[in-house]
Image (cartoon, rainbow, N blue to C red):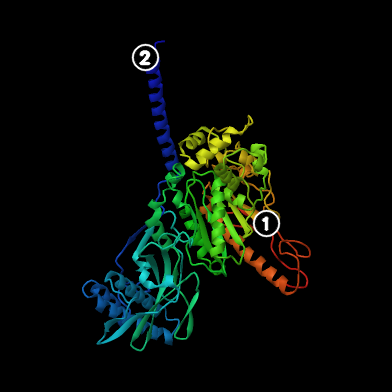
Amino acid sequence: MPLAKRTSKRVQLMMKDGITVFLVYWAVILVVISLTGCATESAVRERVPVFKPLFGTSQPANGREKTLVQALSLVHKNPLVALGENMHAAQTALRELKNDPKNAVALHDYNFAVARIIGIIRDAKLDPWSKPIVVPVHGGSLLLTVKKDPRPMWNPALYTFTPADQFMIGGKYVEEHATRPGIGAPVVAVGRKPNPDWRENFSIRKTYYGVTALVRFHGDSCMISFDDPLEKETVTMDGRTVGLAADFTVPLAVMLASTAQKVPKLERMLFPEKYADTGHLFRLEPYNPNKAVVLAIHGLMDSPSTWAPMIINLRSDPEIRRHYQFWFYSYPSGYPYPYSAALLRKDLDGAERKFPLHKPMVVIGHSMGGCISRLLITDSSDKVWIMTFKTSPSQTPLPPATKKLLTDALIFRHRPEIGRVIFISSPLRGSEIATFSIGRIGSMLIRTPRALLSAGNDAFKITTFHASELKLKRAPNSIDTLSPKNRFVRIINTIPVVSGLPYHTIIGDRGRGDSPNSSDGVVPYWSSHMDGAQSECIVPSDHGAHQNTNTFAEVKRILRACLKIRKCRAGARKVGWQGTCEGESPLRALTEQATLPDGPSCSRLKGCVSFSPGLR
């Protein structure tokens, strides 16, 4: 065949292949979109506040409420006068509450007035945070001030405050509107500028946080204060202890709506190197050494926002609020998960230096996040390395940079700060979808970071594959490491988790009740099941089991049981008992059965029930 004809045919084949790849690319995109759904995670918009009397009547119940209604009409015409009217209404409501603490109308009016005070300060661009403001109030005046807080990050001048009742929220991640009744106006605080040293402090780039505003009156002074509803259940007002109002949903909704587009889930999977700076360990609340950390790790093509429904539900529980704080690990999910785990270990080292933990950490991993969690409670020594390369690390001929990267990913010890792990829909033995055509096409679309590409090329030269293994000519990515045929997946499942560390599994069966022959549509039961789990809970859910209400109830139960065990151990230490509270004699361990919403039964956690000498 003439050279020109052969060249023309080759060009035609290349064009055909290019078109095929293009079509496949968009086919995968469409499949991904259809699987993840098009519903908005969180949408918020502000509304003009309207006063509604407590008992649903159309007219204000008293003169104070008439004042509140009138003040709304003055907000734009004369904000200082409107501010004074609301301060006067709050003051009269507090007087009534002092005489009658159960006066629901006075409490309702006070909270509305405080919310409007905060709203007017924002809209009129007033600045009582820097210096007091003289406000005209009913023929006289009041000095509006703010209570000083010694903590630098609690300086109100750093934030813009918006009353929570001025937001209308919607979206699949904020369907549960969790609030706590009490005194005060729930407010959303948004940082005016990016947080300095946010990465070193394991925080987020910009603060979005829920606080509760209160005003107190002393002579001619009206003082604003802000309290953290995650730290305080009650406050003191006029010598009385009263419950502190809170909104646990709106602040998260505002944050999600403001930041969702900055952390694109699909792009982070397809182009992990481009989004490398989005990977970090972070917290959404001030660190409290007296609370245990719950670390949540998301899965493939996801982000920490996926935990919002569970966090809102858990924060609505007073016992959980008192004893736990929530941290998150975000990472570009195109990385092979052993590499993501290595990056997390580095972050945990830094966090431990910055915020030493005084209580065991609980880790919750969903999907591939569960695979990462599995590596945090495993001692690999050099077993993975030797079974991969057939030689010891010292004898493996690799460039120094490659050897360092692979050593971090393949040789690791369990994290001593972790005391318990909850696996949700985790493909611990892989998912066959990663092996099927759609999985292989998806894997081809992920752009391997340059460092991993170089390391993969070096490793490929000295690696031999068995016929039954997934054979790659490049560095594996996240989808590759979720294949049951992947060598790492097979090896890691021959290494047990560290002895004595309790763990739990939550597995979806799509409501079919066919376990152990079940699947959540992505991960089969045989891959999520773990022998030795303290409990296994089957929930009627697809792969998004971490957003299922049954899962919320099970996680809540486990966290509460942890508290009971901790109290049991503390009691045991007081009386000199050297045993544990995990079922060792003479402790009596029970495996309880309980029914969660919608009916599924869960094998319950072994807990401390009683032990000699007589402590219960």
Question: Which residue in the structure is indicated by mark 1?
Answer: 501
Give me the residue at 67% from left, 45% from top: 382
Give me the residue at 52% from left, 60% from top: 327
> Against 394, is 236 above or below?
below
Residue flagged by tag 1: what amino acid is it?
A: Leu
- The 10 Å Cα crowd at callout 1, few under 14, some 14 to 19, many 20 or more, is some
Give me the residue at 44% from left, 37% from top: 28
Residue flagged by tag 2: what amino acid is it?
A: Ala
Q: Secondary structure at mark 1?
A: loop
Question: Which residue in the structure is indicated by mark 2?
Answer: 4
> Against 31, is 39 above or below?
below
Q: From where the camera sits, is residue 128 visible? A: yes
Q: Secondary structure at mark 2?
A: helix
Q: Which mark is residue 198?
A: none
> Front-most of 186 and 178?
186
Q: Position of residue 380 (x, y in %)?
A: 66, 48
- Give the quadrant of the N terminus: top left
- Give the quadrant of the C terminus: bottom right
Location of residue 4 (image quadrant): top left
